[in-house]
Image: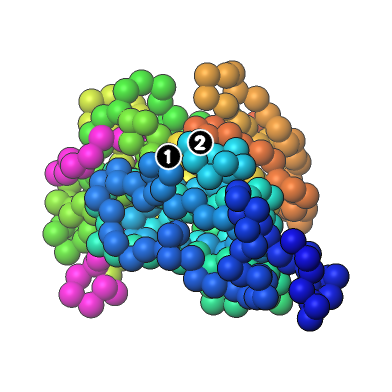
Amino acid sequence: MPLPNNINDREYQKFILDQNGNVSVRMQDSYKPYLDSSNSTTTALGAAGTYNAGASDGWVDVSGYISVVTACLADQNGTLYMEFSDTGSGSADSSLTYAVTANINEVHKLTITRQYYRTRYLNGSVAQSSFEITTIIGDFGTLTAPLNLSLGQDADAMAVRTIEGEQDIAEGKRSGYSIVNKFGSNASVTGLADVWDGTGTYTGFPTGSAELVTVVSSAAGDDSDFEVTIYGLDASGNVQSEAITLNGTTKVDSVNTYTRVYRGVITASGTSNTEFTAGTITCQHKTTTANIFFVMPASANQSRVGCYTIPLGYTGYLRHLDVQMAKSNNATATGGLWIRNTGAPPRVTRNFTIGQTSPYVVAIYGGISLPALTDIAVRILTVSAGTLQVTTNFDIVLVKD
């Protein structure tokens, strides 16, 4: 086929031929972006529903273009596939997979690597109420994202931000990331003890089955005016929480069963939410009562437990740890950060010595990696004299696996 007289050599490279050797209809505007209707939809999917799942569904010839951009937004979790093929039928020769989080705008740009392209989608276990996929074929620059956009872990956009990444995480703008801030206190350390308001080493790391928990106060006045919300892990290790109304010195059962309860917070106190508990609030397993998860002192309105368990499906990165004693304590103490990976023996990963004016403070470059279901505790091993008041704070970045 002769080269048209009004086309230079560079423009000629934009021509494509179909399987019969005919010039493509995109002859003169082969880089001009266009909306690909074969790979765009607004039709909601049912539970486990699919889009473009057939062997020949959605395939379009993109050999005259540079790149493809697909944007996806759904009100339920699902999986997006961007696929390429040499033949335009059957299984893809190249398939990139992206986890779609409900109500998070998922946008990806790929360089075209084969003759045919399609967008495929698999919905999760819950039927959608809204769904949108838009696919545009053309030649596109680098994707960017504004400050107020939540970024997924697999986002390939350039984030236009001037603030720290950890602030993004704290504000919920990085999908799959979260920050856990834990603090603990122990006012009566005389020897081996963890940094919590209970006695001795922490009793909230049981290895048995999940059980109902009970919550009770040592004061009859901590009645139905008070609601405590507990946060913990279910039988599999997934995060769950519930609110429990107190009934004074009578134990109140939880609705759910727990293997761990790592925090308790008074979330309602009287009609104006200005009251403090009069007694000590204790949370423990209903059957195995020795498994005490927190002991909340009177007037604290929140537990203070320097212990934590990484939830299932996450890896934790311990980024900061500090341990200190009250300045009135004229003594020293030794201790360490104690961890236990699931199914493995406990071990110490950081040792420290603290004094009246010498706290232990460390920022850990990159963080200590803590796999799912790892237990951690800040433990005092020895004290030089007297009864010490010790406090701790630590920060963990949770990353969804």
Left or right relative to 355: residue 128: left
Q: Magenta residues?
A: 250-274
Q: Amino acid at mark 1?
A: Ala
Q: Which residue does the image show at 56% across and 52% down from the upper left? A: 117
Q: Secondary structure at mark 2?
A: loop
Give coordinates of residue 215: x percent, y percent: 24, 44
Give coordinates of residue 256: x percent, y percent: 23, 39
The residue lying toward the viewer, choosing from 171 and 101, is 101
From this viewpoint, which residue is outermost toward the right? 9
Q: Secondary structure at mark 1?
A: loop
Residue at the spot of label 1: 55
Q: Can residue 67 be seen in the rendering of this structure?
A: no
The residue lying toward the viewer, choosing from 219 and 93, is 93
- For the residues labelled 2 and 1, say whether their Cβ atoms are less than 8 Å apart: yes
Q: CA distance from mark 2 to mark 1?
A: 6 Å
Residue at the spot of label 2: 91
State how the image is colored: rainbow
Looking at the rendered image, the quarter that the N terminus falls into is bottom right
Left or right relative to 83: residue 161: right
